[in-house]
Structures are given as structure tokens and as C-alpha cells.
Amino acid sequence: MSSNLIGSLIWIIFIFLSVFTHMIIKSLSGEVDFIITLFSRFVYSLPILFILAYLARNKLFLKVNNWKNIILRSCFGFVTMVMVFSSLQLIPIGLTTALAQSSAIYVTLLSPFFLGEKIGLIRWTAVITGLLGVFLMIDPISIIKQTSGLSSLGLYLAFGSAITHAGLALILRKIGKTEHPATTALIHNLITSFVIIFLIIVLGTKFYGTTGKHGLEILITPDYLLYTLIFLGFIGSFVQYLMAQSYKYAEATILVTLRYLAIPIATIFGYIIWDETPSSNQITGGLIVISSCLLITYREMKKKTIIQ
């Protein structure tokens, strides 16, 4: 079996687990406070991430070369995840996924300013076309006219998550040159866990997001909801691990192309479980975004080939 095939199979498992994680978060809406869901995603992932980091680096599992970049990675990662998780509770899962996957557009848009990269005419065309697709999916005109059946806050959060994820991608490009991915994932989750615990101590669990039937008491109550929360963190740790592992085997061009499988998968499950039917604008916009991102990826990899 070729390394590209192994990496692709790992990536597909990663995609399904990512969508499954989002489905769990959406199903918990109204059952537990949003902050408890966020707490569980990060805190319960720590044991597995500790083990994986130690197996990968032994006593160096906490060694970091550039703390500034690690802290920036944690900030952008935390904000991105809060936005995605929040939007999942407000708008269809397929739409959240499609808007979040548009981050490649904003990476291209921001790279001349932060990385000094030159963007050619074709990639600028792809960016502008992709933004048109995002415009169709959000449909701001219907929001202004108050004819949209979707939560405007949910749409803005999903849109914002794509922008912050673009910032995260730019930071990860730098971190990948100096830091081990297992250590990066572990420290990111550690920092975020401490932040969430501090916020819960100071503000409680109802200061942000959807309020559920259960708060802190669910964390000490043996119940299917507690087991679901623990499972959420467990799955979350493997999502991060599988993403890093897939890049060890397969070429980035293959993996970036496969990432857009998440959009139809999430849309199908959204339709089956929550009866979420995408509108014609959402379908058209999603297809435009996928096409634009694939074109950006193609041009990026072609440029690297020429340089080599």
C-alpha cells in the first residue's frame, strides 16, 4: 500500500471524526451549557494527548522553541473553535462546515500582508469568486430584509471562524518549521483548558452560548450526558492526532483536496438527523467555494513545483 493511500485513508477517518465531533456538539445544544461542552472538548482530550506526546518525544514532550507562536496558535485556535461550536448550535451543520472550509480564500487574501507572498491574477480571481460563493451562502440581503430563516449570529460566527482559521493556518506554517505537532497540540489544549477553567470559576457556565438544562453538576453525575462529554474529548484528541499523522504519509495536495468531503458528509447527516435542507443559494455558494479553494490549492502547489 502506497504512503499516499495510507495518508488519504487516515485523512478520511479524520474527516468523519471531525464531522462526528460537530454532530455531538450540535446534539448537546439545549442539554448542557455551551461552556460545559467547550470544557469537555479540551479537558477530556488531555490524557490521550499527554500519552501521544510522550510516546513521540519522551522527556522532551513539553519542549517548545518559540512560546510566542505557540500562544498565538492557542489564541487563534480557541477563538476559531468557539465560533464554530457556537454556530453549530444556531445554523445547519452543513452550512457551518461549508463556511468554515472557505478559510483557504482568506489565507490567500492575507498571505501578501503577513508572509510577503505574491498573488497572481489567477489566484486573485479565485479569491474574488470564492468570496462571491460565501456571499451567496450567507445571503446578507435576506438578513437585512429580515426574510432569512437562518440565525444571522450563527452565520456571522461561521464566517468569522473561517477568517480566524486563516490566521491560524498562517501561524501553523511558521510553527511547523520549529515545533513538534504532538507538543503543539498538547500545549494548545493545556492553555485552553486553563483559560476555560478560570472563566468557569469567575463567571460560571452560563455567561456565553446556549444555556442547557444542566450545568457544572453534570460533570459529577454518572449519566449518559457525562459519558457523551467524555467521549467528545476522547474523539477530539484523536482528530488532532490523525490530522498530524496523515501529513506524514500523504502529499498535501491530496489531503487538501479531500478536506472538502466534509461539506457533503455534514450536509447529508444534517438532513438525515435534523431535517436540515440546504437552499439553492447555499448549494451554489458551496460549490463555488469548493472550486475556488481547489484552484487556489492547485496554483499554490504548482508554484512550489516550479520553485523546486
Image (cartoon, helix red, strand yellow):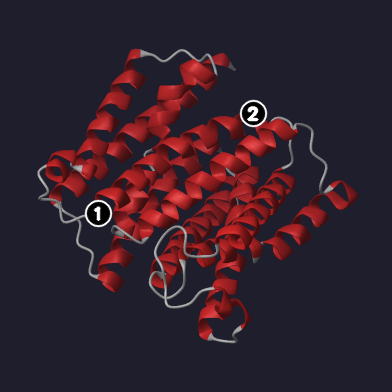
**Going 83% across and 42% down the picture, which residue do you hit?**
63
**Going 47% across and 34% down the picture, which residue do you hit?**
166
Decide if residue 238 is in sight here: no
Crowding near the residue tagged with mark 2, few <14, some 14–19, many ≥20 C-alpha atoms within 10 Å? few
Could you tell me residue 196's position as x and y percent? Answer: 60, 56
At mark 2, the secondary structure is helix
Disc number for residue 54? none
292 vs 208: above or below: above
At mark 1, the secondary structure is loop
Decide if residue 100 is in sight here: yes
Q: Quadrant of residue 181?
A: top right
Q: Amino acid at mark 1?
A: Ser
305 vs 249: above or below: above
Could you tell me residue 215's position as x and y percent? Answer: 51, 74
How many discs mark residues in the rendered view?
A: 2
Q: Is residue 174 left or right of residue 86?
A: right
N-terminal of the pair, mark 2 or mark 1, is 1
Q: Nearer the viewer, residue 271 or 2?
A: 271
**Going 64% across and 60% down the picture, which residue do you hit?**
197
Outermost front residue: 202
Disc number for residue 151? 1
Q: Nearer the viewer, residue 169 or 243?
A: 169
Q: Amino acid at mark 2?
A: Lys
Could you tell me residue 20's position as x and y percent? Answer: 45, 65
Q: Badge 2 is on which residue?
A: 174
Q: Are marks 2 and 1 in contact (CB under 8 Å)?
A: no
**Going 60% across and 77% down the picture, which residue do you hit?**
219
The C terminus: image quadrant: top right
Disc 2 versus disc 1: nearer the observer: 1
39 vs 106: above or below: below
